[in-house]
Amino acid sequence: MIIKGRAVIIPDANVNTDVLYPGPYLNIDDPEQMKLYLFEGLDPSLRDRLGGRTVLVVGHNFGGGSSREHVPLAMKAWGIGAVIGRSFARIFYRNCINLGLPAIACTEAVDAAAHDSKIRIVAEEGKVEVDGSSFPTSPLPPFVIKMIQGGGLVEYVRRRLEEESEK
Amino acid sequence: MAHTLAEKILLNHTDADDLAPGDIISVRCDLVLANDVSGPVAFNAMERMAADRVFDPDKVVMVADHFMPAKDIRSAELQKRLREWSLEQGVHFFDQGRGGIEHAVLIEEGFVVPGMVIPGGDSHTCTYGAVGAFGTGLGSTDIAGCLALGEFWQSVPGTILVELTGSRRRCVGGKDVILAVLAEIGVDGGNDAVLEFVGPGAATLTMDDRRAVSNMAVETGAETGLFPADEVTEAYLEGRTEMPWNKEQSDPDAEFTKRLQIDLDALGPLVARPPSPGDVAAVTEVTGRKVDQVYVGNCANGTITDLRQVAEVLGGRKVHRGTRAIIVPSSQQVYRQAMEEGLLEIFAAAGAVVSTPTCGACFGGHMGILAPGETAVATTNRNFVGRMGSDRARVYLANAWVAAAAAVTGEIVDPLELLEEGAR
Ligand code: SF4
């Protein structure tokens, strides 16, 4: 699986889901509406960098705090293809994987990237390229790759239910 | 092989023969929880999964708490959907006036016993660790999977053992214990781990104190914060549930990723300074800060214990002219108990506002939003930028004595000094 896109950078450590998608907008359940409030508590002007194929490049312990799936749902609605970070908080990481949005820890790639850097990711191999330079990272666990390639948890559960009903 | 308590609980809920930290396993759910915010997003995902029925209606609880009572039309629509879905599926449903904040409701209504696995569509599902259950927060798609299949994938966490010695001093509560842990390991120190609280100091903590501790396990990044079941657990569960359970513990030779020691004898009231639950200081380091609003409530510290602490401070005193005080019992049970004990009368007489049980302003939803430049002291669990309203407001997290003392004096003070002054 190869993912390409322009880098959009959020450099800070411990960026939480409250600033990525503030509480007042939690009464929205449609990703196309959620999209309008992504990064609202952090820097709304970051949204101007989105659109087209992008890859989010983030700092240490990204996505801590609330379990609100509004964050990765809004990211997907913007067409963000992957998130590369120094490290991720657990629930945010799970949410990405479940939605089929690769979240990859690769400190060297984060160091190398600037806004609009060209990013290319070969998820199976755990390879991240920034403006042509290649940075190895540990490949995603096979389970995670299967989940992402299979279209995320929705597809996984749908197939399981189908198989069970055929039995 | 020796196992930690968390590993034993997970092992009881998976087909794997054995497990170790880092293994990815499929875990069976004993109970699945969602609310008016995470529920509808999960129902959308369930529809895409083509799942029309939940795996077991008796093991599903839905609670309207975040924007309850409905703040606006959009919130009302979400709650309508939650209500109709719950009725149609035949699951447990706590509507307005019947429940309160989800994590208070599930514990107080006897849904939780030690050894259970409870995924919830809310990060503070880790609160159930107080009762010895593996409660853990998940996103809505995960919850949809749980609702459909009754299972979820889980990477087996390591365990950080927190040994508590000594006993709580006056004006020190569960909040201070978890803030002390946050001071040690920070907001990322619990990633890929669970916290487990043991030792003679743990035995001295009441269930309400433990709820405050376990609740903020996620603020360290941890999956849950476990108190192995003991006499305190047993006494709490007496009369609340008929479900069987036992007093499981970590094996003495189990492997822990880290060990911490916290001496309760040396612990005074703490605060977390804005904008991070990990920026912990002694209350004495921040005394004198002017406070515009005090908020006592939320799933961590809106218990009857917290309300009694507030009453101890507010009794015979008034809320300061320059300060507003909002008190939110975390559940209908707590609300009624507070009424019976005359606490609501004390609050009203002091000039505090008492609200219906709700998440309310805790997450910046409604009912107590802060203006730019304002400072609050709150017994909640998060003080991120914009968490309670304006992104230019500041929130200090503290226990209920500290919060109530700030309400009286209009600034952050050591509650002990205020109480002793009154006694003189
Ligand atoms: S009270 Fe606050 S922290 Fe607790 S569940 Fe509600 S919004 Fe979340």
Image: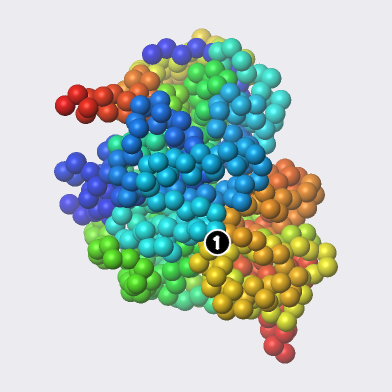
Q: Residue B283: give x, y in percent of width and height.
A: 66, 66
Q: Is residue B172 visible?
A: no
What residue is drawn where x is 55% and y is 21%?
A77
**What is the quadrant of residue B162 in the picture?**
bottom left
Question: What kind of residue is marked 1?
Answer: Ser
Badge 1 element: loop
Q: Is mark 1 within 8 Å of ligand 1?
A: yes
Q: Quadrant of the N terminus of chain A?
A: top left
Among all residues in the image, which is located at the extreme bottom?
B424
Q: Nearer the viewer, residue B410 or B96?
A: B96
Q: Nearer the viewer, residue A75 or B227?
A: A75
Q: Residue B258: give x, y in percent of width and height.
A: 38, 53
Chain under disc 1: B
What residue is drawn where x is 55% and y is 26%?
A31
Relative side of B188 to B54, left or right: right
Return the residue at label 1: B330
Q: Is residue B371 visible?
A: yes
Q: Residue B54: give x, y in percent of width and height.
A: 33, 39
**What is the quadrant of residue B226 in the picture?**
bottom left
Q: For the residue carrying disc 1, how many other residues have a C-alpha within 10 Å: few (<14), some (14-19), or many (20+)?
A: many
What residue is drawn where x is 55% and y is 32%?
A29
Among all residues in the image, which is located at the extreme right?
B321
Relative side of B288 to B243, left or right: right
What residue is drawn where x is 50% and y is 67%?
B333
Q: Quadrant of the C terminus of chain A?
A: top left
